[in-house]
Amino acid sequence: MKKSVFVIALSIILTMIIFSGCQEQNTDVGTTFEGISLESSIVELVNASLDPHRNKANIIDRVDVGYLFHNVAGRDITVNVTVEFYDTDDNILATGGPKSISLLKDYTEQGFGPANIISYDGNNVALIDHVKIIAVEE
């Protein structure tokens, strides 16, 4: 009798230990970074950056938007990415892209490369306050 109670208790404890790691919630992955939002149902934004570049006169002459995605579509996908550039009053100043990225099922991009950066260097570049990344399936 004592042996069977011990085996049952040990089984319950081992089961709890095995499944305790499965309850971890990843709060780092989201759809918003400072000055950057994502509009997509097939990818999550893992990392993003909004980098203004200044010339020798300290005037912004280009803005780069970098992004890394995680495929949440449940299948291999090809994504067309565009970026909308906005001023402080939410007026759209320009659109950049599209760029095409192929992502395997459940794949998370690891590093920024040419396919993960969209730049703008037009007339209103100094007015850019925030951006929206739009990722749709091809």
Image (cartoon, rainbow, N blue to C red):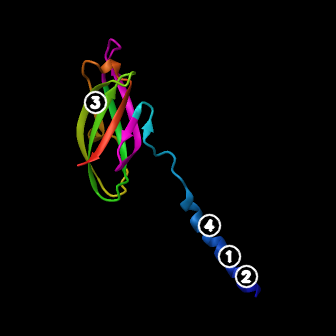
- Going by the numbered disc 3, the residue's amino acid type is Ser
Q: Which residue is mark 3?
A: 119
Q: Residue at 31% of width from left, 17% of height from top?
A: 55
Sooner in the amino-acid sequence: mark 2 or mark 4: 2
Residue 41 colored in magenta in the image: yes
For image coordinates 37% across by 56% down, the residue present is 106
Q: Which mark is residue 17?
A: 4
Q: Is residue 102 above or below residue 134?
A: below
Q: CA distance from mark 3 to mark 2?
A: 66 Å
Q: Which residues are magenta?
A: 37-62
How far across and down, in percent of the image, does residue 7 sit?
68, 81
Which element is circle 1 on?
A: helix
Q: Mark 4 falls on what kind of element?
A: helix
Q: Quadrant of residue 67?
A: top left
Sequence-first disc among 3 and 1:
1
| First-in-chain label (1 vs 2) | 2
Under circle 3, the secondary element is strand
Q: Which mark is residue 5?
A: 2
The percent position of residue 60, horizontal first and vertical second, equals 33, 18
Q: Position of residue 103 (x, y in %)?
A: 30, 52
Main SS of residues in magenta: strand
Tag 3–tag 2 contact (CB < 8 Å): no
17 vs 119, left or right, is right
